Each structure stands twice: as structure tokens, then as C-alpha cells.
Amino acid sequence: MKKSILFITQHLGRTGSEMVLWYLLKDLDPNKYSITLFCKSQGEMFDSLPSHIEKHIMYKYSPKKWLRFYRKLIKFFGVNPIQHQLNVIQQRSKADVWFVNTVAFPEIFEIDKPKNVKFFTYVHELLYAFSEIKRTTLEKAIAYSDVCIGCSDVVCNALFPIHQFVEKQYSFIDTDTIKIDTKVVDKLKELHDILPTDFVWVVSGGTKYMKGFDLVLPILDRFSNQNIKILWLGSEVKNGLTYYVKHIADEKYPGRLICIGAEAANYYNYMAIANGFLLLSREETFSLVMLEAAYLQIPIVAFNVGIAANFVKNEMGFVAYNNTLEEMVDGMVRIHEHSSINKEKLRDEAMRFSKNEQLPKFEQLLERII
């Protein structure tokens, strides 16, 4: 019998957790599942979902003026707009399950828990992210959830002490979406004055302290006499740290730090420029971009965060197990010196966390817990 699932997420944008959900929604068997999606607002992947998925946006951010007006009207009469909207969606979809993607959508945990419906939360957050949400949000996320699903071992280990029903479903990538155009890659190199003699390290993430953006400066200092460049892919946060790091890098090492911003169209072409991949994050739950780098056969140097210690094996790169900058630099030096790297092994390991491998496991998990 076909099961009905209401998936709930923030935007369906290009964050790691929402990319995983997008991969899942695109390929879940419509003969097994009736799928409805509710988003806070409309992210860039929203319109690319298959037509059989019924989609809704929170009244507040709906492109339809009459729905925004309707929200104000019912709110005036003391009705919680999100509660009301989800009740309407539930009556229509008759969902057997509410599947909430991440705990970073606090409004969902401020309404009443739906009756006679299973409630699953797919957790992609760890301690730092927990510090960024309200206590009541996490409390209710745990209390509401019949099952918490962790995206990695480290997340599951964090959930075990606070919830009795924890399942694991690894995040994954869709290798079919990873396309490289070598002509475009060459043009991008020319655009950013990247020479054949340059060794390019790529980093992906927002320009934040937790993503290690500050570590760019000591790394550039350490390799000041070598032709290395750091290509930073990800949203440029308008804060003091971004200004500080970019200002000093531009003054001391002009052209060595290349910040691309939130790139979508040429994301993988930029990745393909790299000779090495750096995971500088101080905390990660998984790191999809590390898998993408491995699939593109780019050697990896990573802090011991997320799945790095279990993923990066011999001939794939190096892990700074004690999370020191000295270890990171040592790993970079060894890559510069052409340490033995097995490119086929990089791709093979990435394929273990591909959609083709993980989607059947995800469907088996849903069948079991529903």
C-alpha cells in the first residue's frame, strides 16, 4: 500500500542537508510513496522537483499575494498561520509521516505535534549548530520525534544519550549531477590568473570561523615562497572576519586567495581546477563536498571532523587526527611532494556514498520505520 509522506525543510537550497533531500525526493519511487513538500521559502532547487510532488511554501513567503494577505487575516484572529497551513496540508495529503529535514526550522517545533502521524527528524547538526538554536527547539525536536535519523556516525553518537530511537542514514551525493567542461575550466583558470605552475587548493563553505576561513592566513604564511593558491567556494559572509582575512591576504599575498562566492552554474568546474582539497572546518557532521572532491579524484587533506577519519584512507590524502594546523600543513606538503595518491581509490570510495548506493538503503529505512 502506498505511503504518504510530508517532507518539511527550510528552502530546498544548496546546503548539504537540503541537497541530500533533493536527491532523495527526485528519486523516491512514486509508486511506493505519495510525496508532499512544505518549505519555509523557495530555494533554487524547489522548481526542479518532479511534477508528481505537491509543493507548498509558508504563507509568509508565498509569491501569491492573496496567501500573504490570508496569513495576516487569520493571524489577526489569533490563528497560528503555520499550524493552520500544515493542518490544511495534512487534511489534503493524509500523510502517514511528517519527515522534518534538520532541526534548523524552529517554527515546526513551535506548533502542536500532529496526531496519529509518525514524526521523523533527519538530524544534520552537531554541537555547534545546537548552540545556535533555542533550547526549546531541540527539546521539542527530540520530544516530537518517534525516530531521529542521524546523517553520520558522529551525529548518531550525539543523539544516543537523548533519544531512545536513533537510526543512521548517511548523507550522499548524486554523481550524475557532477559534470565537468574542460574548456570552461581552462577559461576560469585564465579569468583568475591561475598558471600551470600554481598548486591550487580548493575549500568549500561560507567564509566563517567554523569553516576555518581564518586559517587561510597562516597557511599562506607557511607557503609564502611557493606557488600555491587557495580557491574558496561558498557564500561570502559580510562580517568582520571576512573583511579581516581578505584585507590581509590581498595586502600580503595578492592573488593567492581567490574567493568565488556562492557559485552554482560552474561549481564543479571550479572544483576541477584544484590540485588538492582542504577541509578546514572545526566541526562537520558529514561533508558532502569532501565526497565530491574524491569523486573528482582530488587528493584530500582534512581535519578529523565528520566522516574524514573513516573516509580518507591510504593513498587518498591525509587526516590531521589531532586537529592541529601543523598536521594540516604537513599533509599539504606531502601532497605537494607527490605522495602516492590513487585516483581510482578516491573515486571508488566516493561511490560508496553515491545516490545509487545509498538511496536503496534510505528506502529500506523508510519501509522499516514507517
Image (cartoon, grey):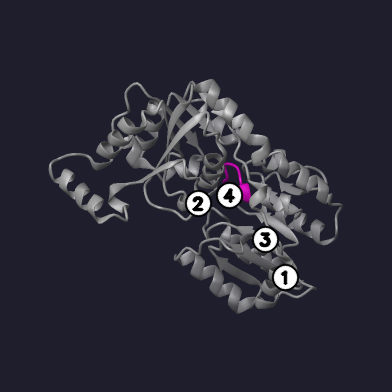
Query: In the displayed structure, does residue 168 sit left or right of residue 329?
Result: left
Measured as percent of width and height from the top left, residue 146 is found at: 43, 23
Q: Earlier in the sequence, mark 2 or mark 1?
A: 2
- Tell me whether circle 2 and circle 1 mark residues in contact (CB < 8 Å): no
Going by the numbered disc 2, the residue's amino acid type is Ser
The answer to whether the residues at label 2 and label 4 have Cβ atoms under 8 Å apart is no
Q: Along the line of sight, which residue is nearer the eye, 61 or 91?
A: 91
From this viewpoint, is residue 290 visible?
Answer: no
Which residue is found at the position 66% from the left and 44% from the top?
Answer: 304
Q: Quadrant of residue 226?
A: bottom right
Name the residue that disc number 4 marks. 282
Residue behind mark 3: 271
Label 1 amino acid? Answer: Lys
Q: Earlier in the sequence, mark 3 or mark 1?
A: 1
Q: Residue at x 77, y 47 (%)?
A: 346
The nearer-to-camera label among 2 and 4 is 2
State the SS at label 1: helix
In the image, which is nearer the foreground, mark 2 or mark 1? Answer: 2
- The amino acid pointed to by label 4 is Arg
